[in-house]
Amino acid sequence: MSKETTLLEKLESLIPGFRGYKQRELIREDDALVRRKIASILDDARVKVERLISNVKKKNISAALRLDDLRLELMKASQMIKHASYGYSGLFDRVKIEEKQLQMLLEYDYKLVTEASKIMEKVLELSFGTDQELIDKVNSTIELVRQLEDDINAREQLFKSEVAT
């Protein structure tokens, strides 16, 4: 038996109550848990950015405006994950999810949770520094949020195409 942590075990440790889509009647609940976890991280990051905007706007209006762009991107990503179609009904209504589909779903879930956590880390690293350093850090964080948005769309598309086949 390998001591290496599986993707499922990693997700179970990151998301309390997550069961790994093991029981058909709980699949939608697991999907909701993953989405709530990601949205929660993004919402927490947005609140921290809002506080930072309040502190920065008197000293550096251009940095405050760029921070507001980050705030809007965080809000958008959070709404995307909250309001994407829960449970991918076409996929989850099947009696059995194939192992390949389950593995892809777990990979996307883990990627989204880790990307959201990385965004939070970047938000926590935002500091006053020089004006340009702060703007550069904000710009790189915005790029991470946009990548997360792309991955949210890719996850949803993946299962929409699986349902069509």
Image: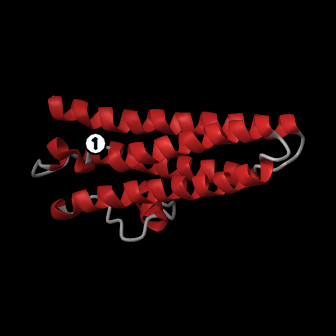
State whether residue 6 appears in this view.
no
Q: Dot 1, how many residues are within 10 Å of its Cα: few (below 14), some (14-19), or many (20+)?
A: few
Measured from the top left, where is residue 102 in percent x and y? 29, 48
Secondary structure beneath disc 1? helix
Which residue shows up at 82% across the image and 47% down it?
58
Measured from the top left, where is residue 28 in percent x and y? 23, 57
Which residue shows up at 23% across the image and 30% down it?
161
In this view, the residue in front, 100 or 153, is: 153
Measured from the top left, where is residue 120 in percent x and y? 62, 53
Q: Residue furthest front?
A: 58
Q: Viewed as shown, does residue 99 lie left or right of 148?
A: left
Q: Residue furthest right?
A: 130
In this view, the residue in front, 66 or 87, is: 66
Q: Viewed as shown, does residue 47 lie left or right of 98?
A: right
Which residue shows up at 68% across the image and 50% down it?
123
In this view, the residue in front, 103 or 34, is: 34
Looking at the image, is 23 positioned above or below residue 151? below
Measured from the top left, where is residue 67 in percent x and y? 69, 42
Q: Which residue is mark 1?
A: 100
Q: Viewed as shown, does residue 62 lie left or right of 141?
A: right
Looking at the rendered image, the quarter that the C terminus falls into is top left
Which residue shows up at 32% across the image and 43% down it?
84
